[in-house]
Amino acid sequence: MPVDDAQFKLAMSHFASGVTIVTTEHQGKPYGMTVASFASLSLHPPLVLVCVEKSVKTHEAIGAAGKFGVSILAREQADISSQFASRRDDKFEGVALTRGELGVPLIANSLTTLQCSVRDTLPGGDHTIFIGEVVDAQTREGIPLLYFRSGYREMRS
């Protein structure tokens, strides 16, 4: 018998993770969301994976566009994470963006931005696992935004 929803959520909240915004653009419209399920997958070729709930608009847009961006947020970008985790219609309002060679919107001043071409998709329950080949990566120095036990945290040096 599987664990119940509340116990599973509590257990997973004990895993500290960085905070990412996954974005894409389809038919001239930007889409984006805060994603906790992100990981490096392979070095050769350079692959990452993101898990996106099937019911959100960004899911369909990534599938249709065949590309996505990942912005790994800095400590001072918690408000941006909250904005992209919300249900508001225009998640991009007031957010500074950059664009790279794939044309996907990326969050300006993030610690890292990745531009990815969708290489494969896999089923994952109520999510789809998008595997992206990284075609560009940009980084800067800074302190990461962390998420642990249902709240933003800071790393101490």
Image: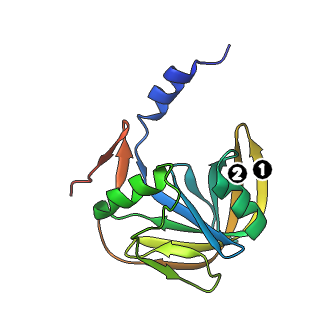
Q: Residue furthest front?
A: 89
Q: Give the camera-side residue of 43 and 146.
A: 146
Q: Residue furthest left?
A: 157
The amino acid beneath tag 2 is Ile
Count residues near mark 1 (Cα–Cα under 10 Å), then give few for <14, some for 14-19, many for 20+: few
**What residue sits right under mark 1 in the picture?**
122
Please tell me which of labels 2 and 1 falls first in the chain.
Answer: 1
Location of residue 99 with respect to 50 vertically, above or below: below
Quarter of the image containing the C terminus?
bottom left
**What residue sits right under mark 2 in the picture?**
129
Q: Residue at x 50, y 22 (%)?
A: 6
Location of residue 68 with respect to 41 vertically, above or below: below
From the viewer's perspective, tell me whether residue 95 is left or right of residue 123. Answer: left
Q: Give the camera-side residue of 20 and 98.
A: 98
Q: Residue at x 38, y 37 (%)?
A: 150
Q: Residue at x 44, y 68 (%)?
A: 93
Quarter of the image containing the N terminus?
top right
Q: Give the camera-side residue of 86 and 125.
A: 86
From the viewer's perspective, tell me whether residue 106 is left or right of residue 104. Answer: left
Residue 148: percent from left, percent from top? 36, 41
Task: Label 1: state its secondary structure.
Answer: strand
Residue 50: percent from left, percent from top? 62, 55
